[in-house]
Amino acid sequence: MLPEAVMKQAQQEMLDWQGSGMSVMEMSHRGPEYTSIAQKAEADLRELMAIPDDYAVLFLQGGASLQFPMIPMNLLRGKSKADYFNTGAWSTKAIKEARRYCDVNLVADSTDNHFTTIADSNDWQLSADAAYVHYTPNETIHGLEFADIPDVGDVPLVADLSSTILSRPIDVSRFGMIYAGAQKNIGPAGLCIVIIRKDLMGDVLPGTPTMLNYQTHADNDSMFNTPATYSWYLAGLVFEWLKQQGGLAAMAEINKRKADKLYQVIDSSEFYANPVNKRYRSWMNVPFTLADDKLDKVFVQQAAQQHLLTLKGHRDVGGMRASIYNAMPESGVDALIAFMNEFERQHG
Ligand code: PMP
């Protein structure tokens, strides 16, 4: 979901942005109007996340998926090994891509428990000579989320925050780099945000294309080529909206409450189940199964009649998945819970 207030503002400004006589879609990305939109979006994101000055904020394209190869290309910096946590489908994809460029050491691997828990930090296999440590704080498909930022010493920590960025405050200074595809908590698809410590940029693998070098984008305010201007503008409107909501501390409170009440319904029922270790349950993606998977289709159909949409689980996991990102109001979760209770009464 996108916040309704944001979409209404975009609708109002669609044909004529603030008296400029142009739609944002029609602007030159180098003109003064668009420059002000781009700069304000970055300033608001820096304020929301309290991003220190020694970090660059980049507005890129290619989704989070293009970051999977860009990370080793840019961050190996003469080393030949990187550490990766494997906690779900997205870390698995990041690892597969990284293996094209370097040795990947698995710090912890949740494959055997079907991505339902994360190994205790005492059992992590960190390597001393890793160029960086990569992890996926929130696994979107499996609904598995790290409870804390892993402590990896001085090795730069890289996080795929695609499905949990802006859901709560985080200490950016703990990371070498954070990246996130926009289409969950930031705005529409087409944009990927990278927050990277400036000293980590510039020393790329030989043969790295100019466009895949973070330094290129940092040196050009993410305008080396034409950026995803409309997505960037809408992301800016979302950042403004988040500030109006009281910032990330306020979002954290709401998000925790939303998730807690949904898990509570699942746990207190014999009909619904969620397999994830309670300590590592996602605030954003809540997968759950029904007692009889033959009812899955009926559940999805009847939910849609109540305007409860896109609840079908990912094909790798089955069942249902409620993605309750920032823009999902608490009333939306309440409506889902009421529907789940009624469905259980009828079919349980
Ligand atoms: N990482 C995570 C955690 C994701 O949830 C997704 C998208 N669902 C991706 C990476 C891939 O993002 P994109 O489609 O923007 O490449």
Image: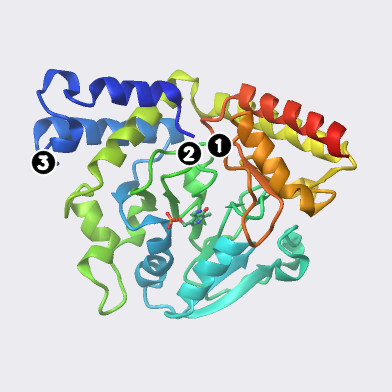
Amino acid marked by disc 2: Asn
Are the residues tagged 3 and 1 within 8 Å (C-beta)?
A: no
Asked whether, in this view, residue 120 is left or right of residue 93, the answer is right
- Quarter-wise, where is residue 31 in the image? top left
Quadrant containing the C terminus in the rendered view: top right
Disc 2 residue crowd, few under 14, some 14–19, many 20+, Cα 10 Å: many
Disc 1 residue crowd, few under 14, some 14–19, many 20+, Cα 10 Å: many
Residue tagged 1? 325
Could you give the CA–CA distance between mark 3 and mark 2, rounded to whole angstroms? 27 Å
Q: Which marked residue is nearer to the observer: mark 3 or mark 1? A: 1
Residue tagged 2? 185
Q: Secondary structure at mark 1?
A: loop
Q: Nearer the viewer, residue 333 or 147?
A: 333
Amino acid marked by disc 1: Tyr
Residue tagged 3? 30
Q: Earlier in the sequence, mark 3 or mark 1?
A: 3
Could you give the CA–CA distance between mark 1 and mark 2, rounded to whole angstroms? 6 Å
Asked whether, in this view, residue 254 is left or right of residue 194, the answer is right
Are the residues tagged 1 and 2 within 8 Å (C-beta)?
A: yes
Asked whether, in this view, residue 341 is left or right of residue 319, the answer is right
Q: Is mark 2 within 8 Å of ligand 1?
A: no
